Amino acid sequence: MATAATRPQPVEIPNKLYFRIGDVSRITGIKSYVLRYWETEFNQLSPKKSGTNQRLYRRKDVEMVLEIKHLLYEKRFTIEGARTFLHQRKSSPRSTASTPSTPPPPATQSSLFGPDPVQMAARATEKMAGVKAELKAILELLR
């Protein structure tokens, strides 16, 4: 039962080149007006516009909508938190790409939704320990 709450249900995205906003709304379960709002909040979400000014989403845009939905609705991120998370994840692979000994993660459905939560928790714990040590040092200076 716990795995259903932590793992999003895979969504079947049709094999099409472009999707209109109504198609994306049906596939993702997100209302059209919310999709338009997310475009203003997430620069990673940028559908093309046709000559008649209709939004044309590519597959990567639909996958990004699903990821944003997962972060906001299931992981309960704020919009700012989700934006930061996506930005950090985008810049993270570039810094590790120069290390040839680190193999890239396998392309799976779960990689669509970001890094392993256990690894993220471990990194957060390490960072918090560093912050705690710095705060103790500041406290000692103030005494």
Image (spheres, rainbow, N blue to C red):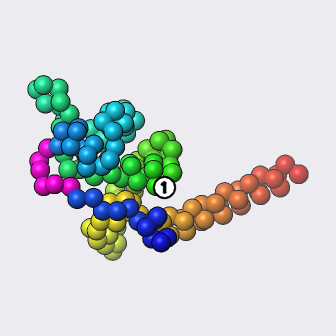
Q: Where's residue 30, x and y in %?
A: 34, 43
Q: Secondary structure at mark 1?
A: loop
Kindly identify which residue carries mark 1: 75
Between 48 and 98, the one lying in front of the other is: 48
Q: Where's residue 97, x and y in %?
A: 32, 62
x 26%, y 67%: residue = 107
Q: Is residue 118 visible?
A: yes
Local packing at callout 1 (Cα closer than 10 Å; few below 14, some 14-19, many 20+) is: few
Give, as a single range, the part of the protein colored magenta: 13-18
Q: Where's residue 51, x and y in %?
A: 11, 26
Q: Is residue 16 magenta?
A: yes
In the figure, 133 relative to 65: above or below?
below
Q: Is residue 100 visible?
A: no
- What kind of secondary structure does the magenta stretch mostly adopt? loop
Between 18 and 101, the one lying in front of the other is: 18
Q: Where's residue 75, x and y in %?
A: 48, 55
x 77%, y 58%: residue = 136
Asked whether, in this view, residue 16 is left or right of residue 29, the answer is left
x 30%, y 62%: residue = 10
Amino acid found under the numbered disc labelled 1? Lys
Q: Is residue 77 magenta?
A: no
